[in-house]
Image: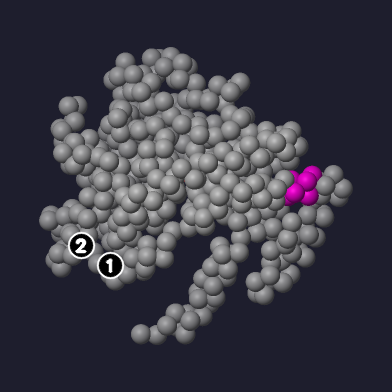
Amino acid sequence: YTPLAELDPEVKELIDQETWRQYTGLELIASENLTGLATMEATGSIFTNKYSEGTPSARYYGGTEYIDKLEKLCQKRALAAFNLDPEKWGVNVQPYSGSTANFAVMTALIKPHDRLMGLRLCDGGHVTHGHYTSAQRKLSAASVYFESHPYSVKPETSMVDYISLASQAKICRPRLIICGASAYPRDWNYATIREVADNVGAWVMADIAHLSGLVAAQEVNDPFEYCDIVTTTTHKTLRGPRAGLIFFRKNHPRAPDLERRINETVSPICQSGPHNNTIAAVATSLLQVCRPEWKAYAKQVILNAQTLAEALKAYGYTLVTDGTDTHLIIWDLRPQDLTGSKVQALCDLLGIAINKTAVSDDTSAHAPHGIRLGTSALTSRDMNEDAIKIVAGFLHRAIQLASLLQQEAGTKILKDFARVATCQEGSNQGHVQV
Ligand code: PLP
């Protein structure tokens, strides 16, 4: 055994720098979290060496006795974490990511060229739900292989427009309706989407990648009551390693073979050997989700997001939908005449990690006018409402600074500022105080 520092000092150095960045900075990216050391220990475990194509007790490789036990344990914990009856629900824990999970579900449920509907990307939907910018630029497998007809939010409120979704569904008669988003701060009305889908004979899939930690704690609406399939990533509010999960109804009246279809589309259709080290880490993180403390964490995540929203509004800022029901806030910077990209660049220098996002009819993905914020990671660092109000103050000062820089000499000052702030590279002192 040669330690990493000796074998590969370059990678070790990058790990150390990233560790420093994560420990000293404020992590406000809504799709991220700070997973526990035990979960990371499982990710770095010896399970990484093992191939195990197939499903428990039906593998193509030998030597899988512990892998079988591990995968079954992970499945059991996944069902328990979401309070699901194993007689009624099954789960596939093999997807490498949320994207693979989503495409595997689409492939299992519908045929190439069938129609599907997901929330428009610039309204907060996820790219894998069928994003395209034109017939020539189809930017997701869902829009390449299926016919995508996105639905929208109401322009006045920025809330999902369930009425126009219903009339659009009547006209285009989709085979699949997807609920879920990555930049939408409000909860979902799954019952209404189920009704719309039943009227046109469509499947309903909920992608709860962002909300899953809150769903498990029963702090937001329950998609399992109404949806045929639920997918999630495991690394956002759920605080696990990077992976995906697919929950499906067993003995579905419309497709009694749904379990076989999902298992086959995950592997061999969309991927091959499971990443067993990741499955071990998913199991470890789900154990924590099953514990009573999880509910307190999820509650605090939402309370912190709502506190942050109120504090920003008190400074006079505009939030999309005027607040949040979840861990996530979309901040509209159009009144400040700032782009999210400028504020993101400045916040990087200040040790605050945020990300730019589209608001309203923003067309540029590179210079949109919004910022997405999330409180999962700060809550994992035990921050409460008092700490979050201080963070809101930092963000306010960052905006003041960005406005000042924009007014005076614009990009040149910002660039000089960036040079000064990063010139101490290597000394781990790159973060500027606000
Ligand atoms: N679905 C939603 C709603 C997401 O927000 C994301 C990630 O941002 C994904 C799917 C894709 O997950 P992954 O990055 O693991 O492929």
Q: Is the N terminus in the top left, top right, bottom left or bottom right quadrant?
A: bottom left
Which of 58/310 is in front? 310
Figure quadrant of residue 321: top right
Q: Does any portion of residue 209 appear in the rendered image? A: no
Figure quadrant of residue 215: top left
Q: Residue at x 50, y 34 (%)?
A: 325
Q: Residue at x 77, y 65 (%)?
A: 420
- Res. 67 mark: 2
Q: Is mark 1 within 8 Å of ligand 1?
A: no
* Residue wearing tag 1: 47
Q: Is mark 2 within 8 Å of ligand 1?
A: no
Are the two marked residues, 2 and 1, in contact with CB atoms closer than 8 angstroms? Answer: yes
Q: Is the C terminus in the top left, top right, bottom left or bottom right quadrant?
A: bottom right
Q: Residue at x 46, y 31 (%)?
A: 187
Figure quadrant of residue 212: top left
Determine crowd level at label 1: few under 14, some 14-19, many 20+ residues with C-alpha closer than 10 A.
some
